């Protein structure tokens, strides 16, 4: 049974940085595409940063140049480095299998990111 656990969220000031981690258990994900998604209150859950099994990325325009997704297959972990954070980045951040909509079987708790003064 695959489980995905996100961590690293918190309260940060505008312009600050956070590094999110997503650890997969129950499987190795060397051959899986992965993605970071986010959902703000009253909004749809959107893909912000995918990474394919071979390392290709395609950031949402809203985060391009500020966020970086990376993966460490040996640790079954995906990271999201978030710099120059803005209040509009406030959301619950999720990782999942897949580079488009995410696997419906594997959504976890997510980790809250709040950008505020």
Image (spheres, grey):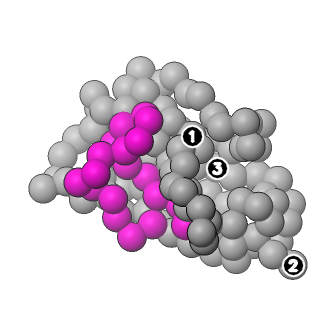
- Give the residue pinned by disc 3: 81
Task: Report helix, strand or loop for mark 1.
Answer: strand
Are the residues flagged by discs 2 and 1 in contact, CB closer than 8 Å? no
- Identify the residue shown where x is 30% and y is 46%: 103
Task: Report helix, strand or loop for mark 3.
Answer: strand
Horizontal arrangement in the rendering, residue 95 relative to residue 28 (left or right): right
Q: Main secondary structure of the magenta part?
A: loop
Relative to 58, say whether 9 is above or below. below
- Identify the residue shown where x is 63% and y is 34%: 59
Numbered label attached to residue 117: 2
Residue 104 is at least partly visible in this image: yes
Mark in front: 1 vs 3: 1
Tell me the quarter of the picture where residue 114 sits.
bottom right
- Give the residue pinned by disc 1: 49
Please provide percent x and percent y for residue 56. 51, 22
Tell me the quarter of the picture where residue 106 sits.
bottom left
Q: Quadrant of the C terminus?
A: bottom right
In three-dimensional space, the C-alpha distance between marks 3 and 2, rounded to whole angstroms, equals 20 Å
Task: Report helix, strand or loop for mark 2.
Answer: loop
């Amino acid at each position: 049974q695959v489980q995905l656990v996100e961590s690293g969220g918190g309260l940060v000031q505008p312009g600050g940085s956070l590094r999110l981690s997503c650890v997969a258990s129950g499987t190795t994900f060397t051959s899986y595409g992965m993605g970071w998604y986010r959902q703000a209150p009253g909004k749809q859950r959107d893909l912000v940063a995918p990474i394919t099994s071979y390392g290709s990325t395609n950031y949402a325009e809203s985060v391009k140049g500020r966020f970086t997704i990376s993966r460490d297959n040996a640790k079954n972990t995906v990271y999201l480095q978030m710099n120059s954070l803005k209040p509009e980045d406030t959301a619950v951040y999720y990782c999942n299998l897949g580079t488009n909509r995410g696997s419906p079987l594997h959504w976890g708790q997510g980790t809250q990111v709040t950008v505020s003064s």
